Structures are given as C-alpha cells and as structure tokens.
Amino acid sequence: MDEISAGLIQAVWLIASLDPEVMEIAGRSLAITLASTALASAVAVPLGGLIHFQDFYGKRPLINLIQTLYSLPTVIVGLLVFLFISRSGPLGSLGLLFTPQGMVVGQTMLILPIIIGLTISALGGVNPQIRETALTLGATRSQAIVAIVGEAKPAVFAAVLLGFGRALSEVGVAMMIGGNIRGYTRILTTAIALQTSMGNIELSMALGIILLTISLAVNLLMARLRGD
Amino acid sequence: MDCRTFRIALSLLGIALLCSSAAADGDRLRLVTTTSLYDTGLLDVIKERFEEKYNVTLDIVSKGTGIAIELGERGDADVIMVHDKVREIKFVEDGHGLERRCVAYNYFYVLGPASDPAGIRGLSPSEAFLAFMEKGRDDPGSVCFVSRGDNSGTHAREKLIWNSVGFNASEFNRSEEWYTEAGSGMGATLVMANEKSAYTLCDMSTFMAYQGQIELEALVTEGDELLNVYVAIPVSPITHPGVNCEDAMNFVDFLVSEEGQGIIEDYAVDGKTLFFKAAGNCDIIGCSPDICAVPTSGCPAEA
C-alpha cells in the first residue's frame, strides 16, 4: 500500500510541478496516439462502412478475421512492422525504425482492426427500419446510408475512443518500433517499463496515473464535443 | 462541432505532427547498447558531452547484447556497445562491424542470499557454480539459481562458465527445479532472484545500482571468469549502406579519447565507482594494444 500511496503523491507532485521531462513524455504519448488514432480512423471508418454496405462473397469470414485481429498481441504487431521498416526490410529505405513516425505506423496497424470491426458492428446495430423508412420516404440509396451513419455516430465514436485507448496504453509496439529513446521516442508506457526495470516503483506508479489522467481528459473532451 | 469536423481536425493535427517531426530531424547517430551501460546513467553523461562536441543527436536504444548485435546485423544500428567477446568477434568477421574497441570494464559478481545455503563464499566462480548445482539438485527448495535466459551478454557469460565446468546450461531448464530462466533484463532478474533468495550472476554496475533495494549479497567477486569488458563497434557502411559511419567513428574515438575515458573512470553513483577505463589496463582485460582504447582507423573509402 505504501508504494501505491507514494506513487499517487508523486504523480500529483510531478503534474503540479510541471516536471519538464514528464511533461515532454506525456505530450509525446498524446501526440503519437492522436496521430495514430486519426490515421487509423480516417482509413477504418470508411472501410468499415464499405464492408457493411456492400454485399460480397466472403463478407462473413472477412468480418470474423477482422474481429480475430482484435486480440493481436502488440509485440506481434511490433515485430511485423519492425521486419518491414528495418533497414534490411522492404521499407528499410524510409528510415522509420526507432522514430516517432514509425511508432505512429505501428500503432495505426494495431488499432485498425478494432475501429473497422466496431464500425461494422455500429452500423449493423442501427435499426433496419431506418433504412426502410428513408427509402419509403423517397430517399436515394446514398441518402439512406447518410441516415444510417447518422444514427450510428455515437457507436462509431466509441470505436474510435477504444482505438485511442488501446494505442495510448500499449507498450509492445512502442518498445519495438520506438526503442524508448530518451527525448525522442520515449512515451509514458515505455518510460513505465524502464522505470520498473530500474526499480523505481513509485515513479512508475506516478507515470501510470498521469497516463490515466490523460485518458480521462480526452474522454471528457470527446463527451463535450458530442454534447453529452 | 460535430463528429466529422472533429475527425478532420484530428487528422490535420496528425499530419501536422508527422510533418513537423520529420522536418526537425537533423543528423542522428543511433547507438544500440547493452542495458547496464544505460540503466546506470553513464551513457547519459557521455551523450551530453559527445553532443556538445559534435553537432549530432545521439539516440540511445538500450537492449541486451543479443538484440544489439542482431540490430547491428540488420543495419538498424550505427554503432553498438556490447559485452560478449565471442559474438563481437563473429560480428566483425562477418563484415557487419568495422572494428572492435575495448572501452571499459568491470566485473560480474555471483550473488546469493546472505545465509549462503550452498556455501560458495570464498570459492572460485566455477567452483561456486558447481556447488549450487550440486546443492540445488539435492535440495531445490533451499538452493536455486536464476538465469537471465535472454541471450544477453550476462547470459552468455553464465553459459560460458557452465561450459567451463562441463555442463550445458540449455539442458538444465526443462527438468531441473533449481534452475530458473527469467527471460528478463538484469533488473527484473535481480528482483526475481531476491524474491526467491536465489543465486544469480550480475554485472557489478547493476548490482551497485540495486544495492539497498535487494537483500542479495556479492558472494564471489574475483576470478578471471568474472571479467566483464565493454566494447564499442561501428557498423560497416559497406555491408549496410546508409548507416551513419562518420559519426559512429567520432563516437568511438570520443569514448577512447582522454576525455571519454575520464568520464568512464570518474562516473560514480552514490560515491561508488561502477566502471573502469580500458586505457592503461589492456593487459588486465586481455585486449591487445591495437584494439584497446585506441582511435579507429576511419570510415572505409567506399562509404
């Protein structure tokens, strides 16, 4: 219990004193996660819509595959992306390994399946009568789609938020692709892993609390934007 | 602000971030190092002084020796700092590394609980290994050993000592209760060995850093098998075009310079010395004069 309360106190102190290194690490965590969530959403939401609204052969197995990838271990994503962007890999010339940009690519890959899959579920959860009604009222097919997407908005929002949460909290990709370089690719989760391995338990606890605080702030902001 | 405008704003932010961080990249030198040199804080001091002198950003990736060599072989490191002579020599012979330079040394310690149930205090390292193996086989409840089990330099040394007394460590793990593979870094392994009151092999600097947090004691600290030499190797631009050879050479030259060796010698945590300089100690550490703390011969012309 001592370590937990000491961690809490230290977290408050690190936040209150605006510790420059902690602020920098927290800012980097947030920036990289926002970038990967934005990138992943920009691809995954339209793609999820496309899969939902199109009927094609193999649709069900494809959805099953996407849902299976929810449990893709972060180190496996890290390893795959590593093999692609390593200098000996096919994309080695881009020099993405051990850079923040590389981390964004890795986290994007990690959360794509979640946002695609949950977007499909969100659209599937819309009452089918809305489509019928819209069509009966003389709407074109694309107008009906707009109506359905409008109904599914909160659930799609939740999908994006979950993707954000997974990207913010993951450590496997960040460690393998970022390399935890101080002042360059060190983010909250990799800093926590390092501090724990160095035996600084209280500092690790404090960083964990800061991570949760960021998550809370983003959630509140999102809720506000949605007008809840 | 509705959902779509927010998402657009988010995307723009992401793109802006990508562009800005890409533009901010100047010259960077990527050092992949064994954890002990980094976790003790030594490389932070070296980084500061090196960056002051040369106009380059030193990116330090701290991993075990095994992965450091692997990253070097893939061309993902510009320079590596490791401590496993056998693999270092192979790394250079295979054309991945340009030249080895001994830069620092200290010792491995055999740690164990103060009660020393296997009675290894005062023994040589290989006698100590035999002692806790025999006692561990008889009574795995009170005598056990925690191995790094992660292909690091320390793990390599442990296997070397087992080989020297005629055993193959990889055969222990499956059947023998007294032998545990942690599969973790030195810090995590120390914590595990401490919880289990087990014996373990640890480099001197990590042990010093953990003193006060763990109850294990250094029971065997002397013997040739415990010498721990840290080496820096620039990655070859011939085998791996695109590596930053020039700055890698500057870095190694800085490490072996009077200034660099001085930083290593003077570096202390809580008044305790963690590393010794290679310069002037070449005989002790078994490095021939041509590779011991002497400047590199520069980048090959083809680079």
Image (tube, grey):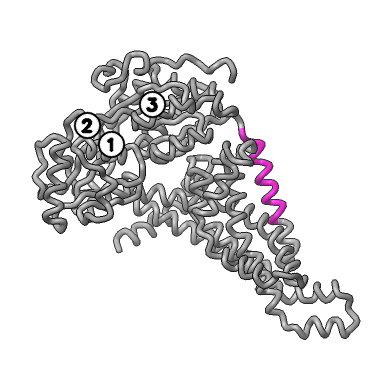
Check contact, mark 1 vs mark 2: CB within 8 A: yes
Label 3 crowding class (10 Å Cα cut-off): few <14, some 14-19, many 20+?
A: few
The percent position of residue A40, horizontal first and vertical second, equals 66, 57
Q: Residue type at mark 1?
A: Arg
- Which of the pair B65/B55 is nearer the observer? B65
Magenta: main secondary structure equals helix
State the image quarter where residue A112 is shown.
bottom right
Q: Relative to B96, say whether A210 is above or below.
A: below
Task: Pinpoint residue A4: horizontal percent, then vertical percent.
Answer: 34, 61
**Quadrant housing residue B176:** bottom left
Determine whether B96 is above or below A61 in the image. Answer: above
Residue appearing at x 42%, y 35% in the figure: B33
Residue bearing mark 3: B89
User: Which residue is found at the position 55% from the left and 45% from the top?
Assistant: A82
User: Crowding at label 2, few (<14), some or many (≥20) Cα neighbours within 10 Å?
Assistant: some
The residue that disc 2 covers is B225
- Which residue range is magenta in the image? B10-25
Q: CA distance from mark 1 to mark 3?
A: 15 Å
Q: Which mark is residue B257?
A: none
Q: Residue at x 58, y 36 (%)?
A: A87
Provide residue B8's location: percent of width, then percent of height.
74, 57
Choose the circle earlier in sequence order: 1 or 3.
Answer: 3
- Would residue A34 appear left or right of B236 to someone viewing this image? right
Which residue occupies the extreme right position in the image? A138
Q: Residues within 10 Å of mark 1 (few under 14, many from 20)?
A: many
Of badges 2 and 3, nearer the viewer stands: 3
User: Which residue type does callout 3 highlight?
Assistant: Ile
Under circle 3, the secondary element is helix
Which numbered tag is attached to residue B157? 1
Same-subunit check for callouts 1 and 2: yes
Share a chain, discs 1 and 3? yes
